[in-house]
């Protein structure tokens, strides 16, 4: 792969978008490579948590590749948008937890990519925004949908209509990021968080992700029913047996998976 670095160490996988000269902007080639990596992760049950970051000190992802988009006609732009949406949805729907380590600019498609992850940890240097309307387009990788779900309709509209770029503190204040760290400690903190999650019941974590993600797209009654189904399903897993046995035996649980 030319645009992505992919590493697996035990239960942890790390994806680095690696086009630092273009501030890790997402072109079609990078999106296709990302799709391949996501499929590999989806098929590897040893992997429990994924960290997604950008290479270099300046950017997480500075958006979709404007140089490539500039030349597109309407049909090509639609195909590009569909590719991006598909990749971002498969990332969001991975059974594993995905943590975005936002090390710099997360603009346009970059902000949208971080929002397709389960959590966002930001460096103090991170900057977030949806600058698309300044380019004469609308957010195309589901930013109009994920941003209001994360920060509320009013704040999402303000960010999208003004194309304002906000710093990590403001992103934290409005609930777009979970935590802020100094740039040099960001990845270590992301790995620390990853290992904390890895130490819990992997099936339970994955099922909780499914309950949250799917439940949010349902009416309340269906979501409650779905949660009850998921809760019941836990009792068919080794995680539940080991977790509860460990509690009763007053020892640390040793989860091996479903
Ligand atoms: N695309 C391509 N190249 C980019 C880029 C981008 N998004 N962002 C930066 N670069 C390149 C610059 O062109 C420059 O390349 P060289 O000139 O060195 O060859 C290099 O990265 C360094 O950037 P700068 O020289 O500009 O660095 P600065 O520190 O001065 O500025 C910046 C950093 C992040 C503020 C600035 O680069 C910037 O404003 N970048 C663009 C940010 C942006 O507007 N991002 C949103 C892109 S639009 C859809 C599908 C997708 C989308 C929409 C619709 N459908 C088809 C439905 C998504 C749209 C977007 O994401």
Image (tube, rainbow, N blue to C red):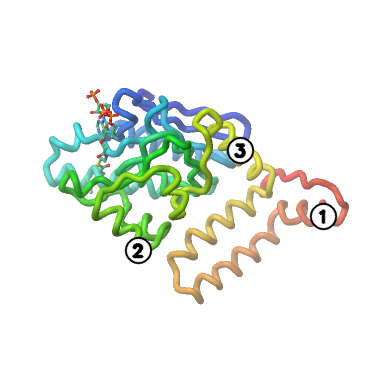
Mark with earlier residue (1, 3): 3
Do residues under tags 2 and 3 come within 8 Å of each other at their CB atoms?
Answer: no
Residue found at x 51% / y 76%:
221
Measured as percent of width and height from the top left, residue 160 is found at 27, 53
The answer to whether residue 103 is left or right of residue 185 is: left
Among all residues in the image, which is located at the extreme bottom? 221
Q: Quadrant of residue 207?
A: bottom right
Q: Which residue is mark 2?
A: 153
Do residues under tags 2 and 1 come within 8 Å of each other at their CB atoms?
Answer: no
Which mark's residue is nearer the viewer, 2 or 3?
Answer: 2
Residue found at x 47% / y 48%:
177
Q: Where 251 falls versus 21 (above or below)?
A: below
Mark with earlier residue (2, 1): 2
Q: CA distance from mark 1 to mark 3?
A: 24 Å
* Front one among 36 and 113: 113
- Ligand 1 within 8 angstroms of badge 1 C-beta: no
Measured as percent of width and height from the top left, residue 181 is found at 53, 37
Mark 3: which secondary structure? loop
* Front one among 79 and 4: 4
Residue found at x 60% / y 29%:
9
Residue found at x 84% / y 47%:
251
Q: CA distance from mark 2 to mark 1?
A: 42 Å
- Ligand 1 within 8 angstroms of badge 3 C-beta: no
Q: Which mark is residue 247?
A: 1
Q: Which residue is mark 3?
A: 46
The quadrant of the picture showing ligand 1 is: top left
Mark with earlier residue (2, 3): 3
Which mark's residue is nearer the viewer, 2 or 1?
Answer: 2
* Front one among 129 and 86: 129
Q: CA distance from mark 2 to mark 3?
A: 38 Å
Q: Mark 3: give few (<14), some (14-19) or many (20+) Cα within 10 Å.
A: some
Mark 1: which secondary structure? helix
């Amino acid at each position: 792969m030319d645009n992505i670095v992919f590493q697996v160490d035990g239960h942890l996988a790390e994806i680095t978008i690696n086009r630092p000269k273009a501030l890790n902007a997402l072109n079609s080639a990078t999106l296709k490579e990302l799709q391949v990596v996501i499929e590999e992760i989806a098929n590897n049950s040893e992997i429990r948590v994924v960290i997604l970051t950008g290479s270099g000190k300046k950017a997480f992802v500075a958006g979709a590749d404007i140089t490539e988009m500039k030349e597109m006609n309407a049909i090509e732009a639609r195909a590009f948008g569909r590719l991006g949406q598909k990749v971002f949805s498969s990332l969001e729907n991975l059974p594993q937890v995905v943590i975005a380590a936002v090390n710099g600019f997360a603009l346009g498609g970059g902000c949208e990519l971080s929002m397709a992850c389960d959590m966002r940890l930001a460096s103090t240097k991170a900057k977030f925004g949806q600058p698309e309307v300044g380019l004469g387009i609308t957010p195309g990788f589901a930013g109009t949908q994920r941003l209001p779900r994360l920060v509320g309709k009013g704040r999402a509209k303000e960010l999208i209509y003004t194309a304002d770029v906000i710093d990590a503190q403001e992103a934290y204040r409005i609930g777009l990021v979970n935590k802020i760290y100094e740039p040099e400690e960001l990845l270590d903190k992301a790995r620390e968080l990853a290992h904390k999650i890895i130490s819990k019941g992997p099936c339970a974590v994955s099922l909780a992700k499914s309950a949250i993600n799917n439940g949010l797209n349902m009416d309340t009654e269906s979501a409650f029913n779905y949660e009850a189904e998921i809760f019941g399903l836990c009792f068919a897993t080794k995680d539940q047996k080991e977790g509860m046995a460990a509690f009763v035996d007053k020892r640390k649980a040793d989860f091996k998976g479903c």
